[in-house]
Image (cartoon, rainbow, N blue to C red):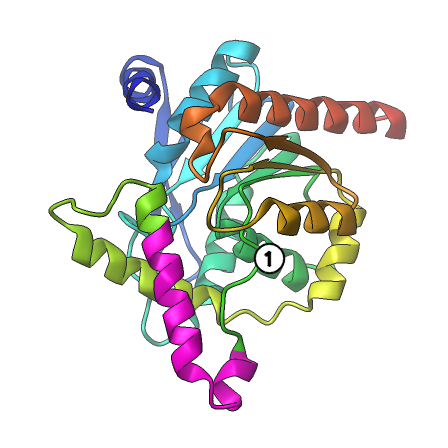
Amino acid sequence: MAESRRSAESFTRNRDRHRFIVTADDDTPLMVTRYGRRDAAATVVYLHGPLSDATSMAPLIGELHQHFGGEIAQLVYDQRGHRHGVPFHPDRPAMAQLVADLDAVLTHASGQVILVTESLAAILLQEWLFRHRRGILRLDAVVAICPVPELPGDERSVRDGRADLARRAANSLERELALAFGILGCDDELPILESVGAMMRALRGGEADVAVVEDMLRATPTWIVAGKQDRLVGHKRVAELADTVWAEWVLIDDAAHDLIHTHTRIAADTVVAALEAAHEQTLFRGA
């Protein structure tokens, strides 16, 4: 894992990249980084997981940049409310802010669009899909890496007097996330975990109808990559999700939740498969 992180740092230092500001709908500036051509025939957009930021995707970005020689574009940004992102605005629902930010970033994607999510970002994907269910969906494929499709302790737990149980489940998830991403024991562990708590509250504020989202994913080529040793979401749950949305999926026996760093090549191969499928679909449509 350390070797992967060093490789990622080397990539971000030495490869040409373009950083620019995207203005969200509430005038908040979002820092976005593009790798590859601005007018590329396909763009991969990344949604990083919790306890991380845009740099966590560097190993995957580097692998794909090398594979395609910079002929595809890759966009990554620090999500609001996460480790290094701008804070949520207190006067607006946090989930709405996350969805609007993704909308703003996607306006800078060219060609076919492949959305890559990691971990709890799968919940943001669900909410984004649901809010665009009546419009034209500008999305050609989805790749979900170690998806966590729901949070423990739903609203029924609170209404039924099981709020303490729900809170304990959420605290357990925070600890498992911290273990997965190597946060426990670091100097700024407490503020990082506090930011994760805020992010989890934001994700819990979604309105997505799961059945509607599942229908939308069935109509969108979808790939799932998961680790059999992942303690945050069991591989049986991932298999169930893949079967429900008709996704292609890869289960890595010796991988856990941080497989972007530990099994970068397999994750990259999956994104390549999604890109190739999107290209073939475009040819089939006669574009």
Position of 238 with respect to 90 (left or right) is right
Q: Residue at x 71, y 45 (%)?
A: 242
- Could you say where residue 255 lies in the image, as x and y percent from the top left? 49, 31
Q: Is residue 256 above or below residue 82?
A: above
Q: Residue furthest left?
A: 187
Position of 74 with respect to 58 (left or right) is right
Q: Which quadrant of the rendered structure holds the C terminus?
A: top right
Q: Residue at x 55, y 57 (%)?
A: 123
Q: Residue at x 16, y 46 (%)?
A: 185
- Could you say where residue 285 lies in the image, as x and y percent from the top left? 88, 30
Q: Which quadrant of the rendered structure holds the N terminus?
A: top left
- Return the residue at label 1: 128
Rendering quarter of residue 273 = top right
Q: Amino acid at mark 1?
A: Trp
Q: Is residue 193 above or below residue 276?
A: below
Kindly state the secondary structure of the residue where label 1 is placed: helix
Which residues are the magenta region?
155-176
Q: Main secondary structure of the magenta part?
A: helix
Q: Please say whether residue 20 is visible from this viewpoint.
A: no
Task: Depth check: give the residue in front, 48 or 14.
Answer: 48
Task: Depth check: give the residue in front, 143 or 242.
Answer: 242
Q: Please say whether residue 243 is visible from this viewpoint.
A: yes
- The crowding category of the residue bearing disc 1, from other C-alpha atoms within 10 Å (few below 14, some 14 to 19, many at least 20), is many
- Could you say where residue 21 lies in the image, as x and y percent from the top left? 35, 41
Position of 217 with respect to 103 (left or right) is right
Residue 33 magenta-highlighted: no
Task: Depth check: give the residue in front, 61 or 3.
Answer: 3
- Could you say where residue 216 lies in the image, as x and y percent from the top left? 76, 53
